[in-house]
Amino acid sequence: MKISYNWLKQYISIPETAEEIGQTLTGTGLEVESVEPFETIKGGLKGLVIGEVLTCAKHPNADKLSITTVDVGSSAPLQIVCGAPNVAARQKVVVATVGTTVYPTKGEPFLIKSAKIRGEQSEGMICAEDEIGLGESHAGIMVLSTTVANGTSAASFFNIQSDSILEIGLTPNRADAASHIGVARDIKAAKNRELNWPSITSFKVDNTSLTVPVSVEEPEMCPRFSGVSIANVKVQESPAWLKNSLQAIGLTPINNIVDVTNFICHELGQPLHAYDVAEITGKKISVKTLPAGSKFKTLDGKERSLLATDLMVCDGEGNGMCLAGVFGGINSGITEKTTNVFLEGAYWSPNVIRKTSMHHGLKTDASFRFERGTDPNGTLYAVKRAALLIQELAGGEIASEVVDIYPTKIQNRIIEVKDKNVNRLIGKSLSRDVIFGILESLDIQITDKKEDRFTVSVPPYRVDVTQEADVVEEVLRIYGFNNIELTEIAGTDYLASFPDKDINKFKRSVGEMLSGNGFFEILTNSLSNAAYQLKHKLAFNGEPIEILNKLSEEQGILRQTMLFTGIEVCAYNINRRQKDLKLFEFGKIYWKDAAKQGKEKYCEEERLALYLSGSFETENWQTKSRQVTYYDLAQFISQVLQKSAIENSNQEAFADPLFEFGVKILKGTKEIGKIGKVKTTLLKDFGVKQEIFYADLSTALLFKMANPKFVVTEVPKFPEVRRDLSLVIDKKVTFAEIKDLVSATEKRLVKELIAFDVYEGDKIPQGKKAYALGFTLLDEAKTLTDDEIDKTMNKLMSAFEEKMGAVIRK
């Protein structure tokens, strides 16, 4: 559905641009698929001005050409060679200046250039109407009868209008928005602005000389029929404003009477039909069905066989004049000879119109609206509004009382809404003031208020609001989906059945990922030997919990760390020549909080422990064996963090009696865990001589953060660029510090940073290390040039030199 931005602004104040109001409408559920420019004349006559021919003389080298000088309001007149036979001095003309692109009525656009024509310089073109899209004639140049100043833009002189057209992907349930007023209603609610309805207060009946009696024989199929007669009209071409409005939304102007009915259809969403009274036999109208198989010729010239359920508007002799709500007949339409008009505005049963439209394969602007449901209470307003416009554009007088057959008024729907259901379905608690304000801005009135519920009255034109959930949806779409904060655990209520987050499923998912990377899961005893931590004077969180009836000293306390029971498993395997180990365990640690009383002083926490030792993989003919390193375990931990949707975590070096070296993994201020190399002195107590790398992570934090908020971005259209850089820096500088510096220096273009080599040795100064870094550069808006790439790399090198004292190796 096309909506004209300029047309829309007639009904509501819109200081926003078309693009901005498009975003607002999309937020309310009226998805704006595109915003396209529109001009009444292609090109908008840009670069064309009104000029005056000062002199006109024959071209010395061509009999059919003239050399003119034309004043176009610039400092000096232009010399223009013209081939039109009617060019003469003292004429006001349209001039296309050099550099202007001209859009002719037929053919391709062309650029006006400074050129020599038969040896004489020409600085523009004096235009004929067909050369600039204003008509068909090429008999000569346009000669204007005007006194406007030379240099006046042709666009302003001819009142060329530019507009923006919003293409709305209207869903079937939003029939109320199938018009400019309908769209303005959503803006009114979203922006809390006033809606300006066109006034019909000047409507009055001039006489009753053209009364056309109407009878409705099928009131269930036609619940309301409104109409009025207008006498002594003059059918002619519509004025520019009306033609421009219709052309902007893709309609072809026909004549002033038909154009008014089309205008009202797209203004109010109420289709109308105009009949030539001279063609209404018997000067009576009846709304009824005809026998199945009856023949009826529609406006497109096709003869159609009617169904028994097709509702017809017939004349006094029972002859069909219009396929009700769908398409007019060939004999009763408006022509240039029409002088008296009967204007019909009706509310037809949507089911009847849908069946007729589908059967006959007729999809019209009228059937599009009627089969979805129009406003039964808006027919009279639409008829009066159209009658006033017809009087304004075609003259005539209102020559009958208004016909309004409405035997059973369609009442507002009464719906009870519970406060708890509003908050439950929206996912946020809104105040009643906010809820009531939104509903009343949508013409949904609050009729009763109780402590925990309220009752609303929904007008019939809101065909999509039929139950409590629909009322809640109205509140939500105007309040704004983007204003509803997402919780850590996403959920829905009565709309989909998503299972609750299950920590056991999460652990299984992480375990499957680790198993896929060659890890084996272990299950160890929660009881541990107190001697392990006493010997090395180790202190953990809280006090150890002793077992009262312990079987042995080796199982005398509940463990406070996963490490000791894990090393026992490693030692057991190593002693049996299973030295290449990749192990993980989900388990609990325990402690006693002396500050608490009773059962609350006993605490437990679930942890994930990983152990890595021996060779990275078994030696084979393709790969030589190598020992695992800290970085191998760090890579696996990175995968665990990704599985938990943890991004941009930080690492911080720490000193710990369990580790030779290691880092804490932080997300903000929360410690997710630790990773490092186990102390050699601890391993000796277990008889282990090979290195063991160990990670200890909080399962609870991993699980809590495993609820990512997805951001979808378009795949880059432009190529990436890779640049490498080698630098020597202080040994204490970490890679994390390098990443922070790169991000602070050039965040937009640097999409990825890797270290593909690190060197420490006698070839560089003592206390230094060399990094080989790889930078991936990408501009998402265009292809990077060599100059831009060099500029970026130079900026990064300067930052390394100034802030880290780096030496760039070139």
Image (cartoon, grey):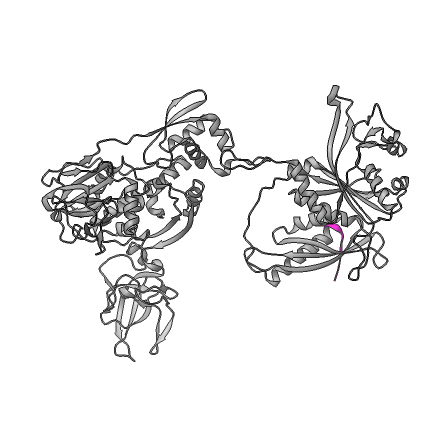
Give left or right: position of 336 versus 350: left
Compare residues 794 and 122 and report the one nearer the observer.
794
Compare residues 360 and 684 and report the one nearer the observer.
360
What is the magenta range?
A: 803-810
Give left or right: position of 710 versus 411: right
Find the residue positioned furthest to the bottom. Answer: 61
Work out whether residue 152 can be spotted. Answer: no
In the depicted structure, whether residue 556 falls above or below residue 1: above
In x, y percent, where is residue 719? Answer: 59, 60
Q: Residue at x 61, y 36 (%)?
A: 501
The quadrant of the picture occupied by the C terminus is: bottom right
In x, y percent, where is residue 579? Answer: 84, 49
Q: Is-magenta flag for residue 764?
A: no
Quadrant of the rendered image containing residue 765: bottom right
In x, y percent, where is residue 39? Answer: 34, 55
Compare residues 328 and 403 and report the one nearer the observer.
328
Quadrant of the rendered image containing residue 727: bottom right
In the depicted structure, whether residue 379 falls above or below residue 628: above
Compare residues 211 and 607 and report the one nearer the observer.
607
In the depicted structure, whether residue 748 falls above or below residue 442: below
